[in-house]
Image: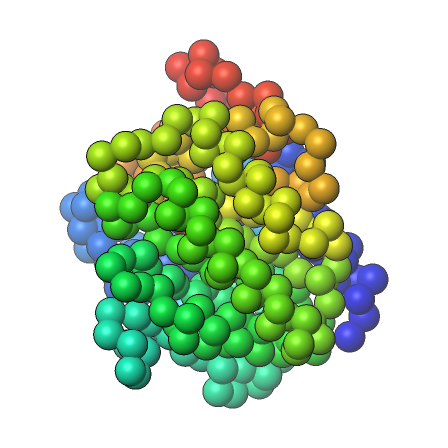
Amino acid sequence: MNLADLNKIARAMTATGKGLLAADESGGTIKKRFDAIGVESTEASRRDYREMMFRSTEAMSKFISGVILYDETIWQNAADGTPLVRLIEQAGAIPGIKVDEGTQALPGCPGELITSGLDKLAERLAKYYERGARFAKWRAVIDIGSGIPSMTAIHVNAHALARYAALCQAAQIVPIVEPEVLMDGDHDIDRCVEVTTRVLNKTFQELRVQRVALEGMVLKPNMAISGKKSKTQASVQEVAEKTVRMLKNCVPAAVPGIAFLSGGQSDADATAHLDAMNRMGGLPWPLTFSYGRALQAAPQQTWAGLAANVGAGQQAFTHRARMNSLASKGEWTTDLETEKAA
Ligand code: 13P
């Protein structure tokens, strides 16, 4: 492992004013997104859609540091035969790859999940590196409900995250460590803080036990936020303050950067929350975005599967990327939302 190089990539992934595009929806998830806009999910339609974003030159060169790809996409070529990975590199962004293989029921823990994909991971990482991937992603899922999460679920998911991260670093790939506490329940923000704190503490304990170099990783956490079904929804300022406090308590300053998931927040909320945190200042790490839905909902709606809409779809994507870039510097304002993409 060359830690200096891993650290350099991790810092580039979270460089000032830039964040990650999570375009790594699995086959099932992208079908759900396409169903919502009335587009059939085929290998060609998935390629066309993602090519549209990767050819958004302004967004990709100014606001996006890297793209998380799904296995299918990393091997796909653009319509003109150029590998999609090369389009990303040509725009000055870094290609990355989702390497987990989704979740399965966790035996003995009803309602809880464990992420799979460790078998043969070393071999897969070597192939992805050869194709151009310089970082990877593994998502662990923790749900909040009555009697859950169990300590078992937290422990085994943290263990798998650390196993994955250690294998990535040995393959000279920066691991994005993503322990996602879902916002689907009816819990309040304080319960989210309590559970996320336990999850982050266990994750960093496992990372240490398994000798993962913190300087060579990026953390992708959820924010401290009220459950979607909670009657009390915390304000933007409360989300920002509780998230920053929680992260300061749990995440060592050696971590080069933190890039949030959006997790089902609206585009506007995901941007406003990130902005409010960065306005607080005095943070030991850069705080940026690694959004899937909060970057792609607008371009998906605008594109709607029609070649004639590609330009407008690119504008919609560029606008959201620019808004989140500003939020990562604490320079976003609501007025900017009504301005047309540059
Ligand atoms: P969302 O921002 O839509 O949560 O997606 C980010 C991601 O990569 C989830 O694993």
Decide: is 204 above or below 335.
Answer: below
Q: Is residue 217 left or right of residue 26?
A: right
Eyeballing the image, is 287 above or below 29?
A: above
Q: Position of residue 291 (x, y in %)?
A: 46, 45
Q: Position of residue 117 (x, y in %)?
A: 45, 79
Rendered location of residue 49, percent (x, y): 36, 49
What quarter of the picture does the N terminus occupy? bottom right
**Side of 15 relative to 23 (left or right):** right
Q: Horizontal and vertical percent for residue 39?
A: 20, 49
Taking depth in this image into account, of 342 and 272 the one nearest to the observer is 272
279 or 168, nearer to the observer? 279
- Compared with 133, 319 (above or below) is above
Query: Which colour assignment does the render follow?
Result: rainbow
**Residue 11 seen anywhere in this rendered image of the structure:** yes
Residue in the picture at 81% in, 70% down: 2
Residue at left 69%, top 43%? 285
In the image, is residue 276 above or below residue 91? above
| Residue found 59% across the figure and 83% down from its top | 122
**Does residue 307 appear anywhere in the picture?**
no
> Camera-side residue: 118 or 242?
242
The residue located at (54%, 58%) in the rendering is 200
Question: Based on the displayed image, in which of its 4 quarters is residue 167 positioned?
Answer: bottom right
Pick the residue in front: 256 or 240: 240
Q: Could you say which quadrant of the image residue 95 lies in?
A: bottom right
Q: How many marks?
A: 0
